Image (cartoon, helix red, strand yellow):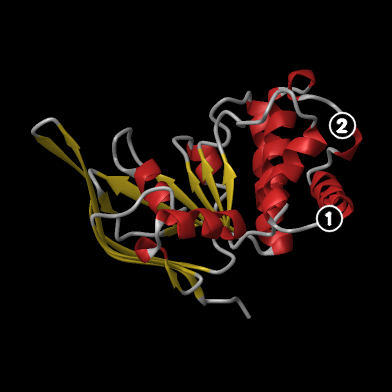
Amino acid sequence: MEDTTPVVEITNVSKSYHRDHYVLQVLNDITFRIVSGEFLALMGPSGSGKSTLLNLIAGIDKPDSGAIQVAGVDIASLSETELAGWRATHVGFIFQFYNLIPVLTALENVELPLNLMGLSGKERREHAEMALKVVNLFDRKDHYPGQLSGGEQQRVAIARAVVTDPTILVADEPTGDLDRNSAEDVLNLMEYLNKEFGKTIIMVTHDPRAARRARVIRHLEKGVLSDVISQTPL
């Protein structure tokens, strides 16, 4: 039986930014849920609020009003220090441009999030090696980012995102800097993590091909979330 427990609950969330005397309303009274194990694609034109919504869910930004609960925690009420600790445990980040540290090997990049987890050096290495095996890059563990292709760098970034076994994975245009074949490899991997490991994934994308890999597609338009949910076949 499919798990319908909500892992993310967003209630009446609004967000605006102030530029000089101008107020830009980015999100307007957003309410929706994301169930555990869901693979959600957020689509919409530039400026529609997709990345802002993703940042709110990930605890990078805070709403002007409304509530955001992730795994039962009201993250909008946490202090900046509390949020930093919460993100380290509960959120795995996948970025468009990988954000790998060039002077560290693939293995060392994947180990980075584990430095806050109180593990021994041996335990960190074992966890990082396992994550690299999951993304099929164990044989490249001693290579530096500059020695890897774009697709391989993104797979290292995904290994880094999952190494702490976070509650949610948030991906902001994860295939936006990749050629078509590399993008397919990354999407196959994300689909695998969702189906085989039950990872909850929230992905912002402009690419309809990428969105079709998700199980649920929702559209943002001028800060308003569509009522229609397009559910793709499993």
Residue 139: tell me if it is visible: yes
Relative height, residue 37 to residue 54 (above, below): below
Return the x and y of residue 4 as percentages of the image width and height: 52, 76
Relative height, residue 229 to residue 93 (above, below): below
Return the x and y of residue 225 as percentages of the image width and height: 29, 54
Question: What residue sits 73% from the left and 36% below the top?
Answer: 109
Return the x and y of residue 69 as percentages of the image width and height: 41, 68
Please tell me whether mark 1 sits on a helix, a strand or a loop. Answer: loop
Front one among 134 and 67: 67
Quadrant where the N terminus sits is bottom right
Amino acid found under the numbered disc labelled 2: Arg
Question: What residue sits 44% from the left and 35% below the top?
Answer: 206
Relative height, residue 177 to residue 91 (above, below): above
Which label is found at residue 120? 1
- Residue 74 image-quadrant placement: bottom left
Check disc 2 and report the residue beneath it. Answer: 140
Left or right: where does residue 106 sit relative to residue 138?
left
Badge 1 or badge 2: first in the primary sequence: 1
Dot 1: few (<14), some (14–19), or many (≥20) neighbours within 10 Å? few
Front one among 11 and 23: 23
Amino acid found under the numbered disc labelled 1: Ser
- Residue 135 image-quadrant placement: top right
- Residue 189 image-quadrant placement: top right
The residue most toward the top is 146
Left or right: where does residue 100 sit relative to residue 144?
left
Left or right: where does residue 174 sit relative to residue 133?
left
Front one among 93 and 172: 93
The residue most toward the bottom is 1
Return the x and y of residue 17 as percentages of the image width and height: 22, 40
Dot 2: few (<14), some (14–19), or many (≥20) neighbours within 10 Å? some
Q: CA distance from mark 1 to mark 2?
A: 23 Å
Foreground: disc 1 or disc 2: 1
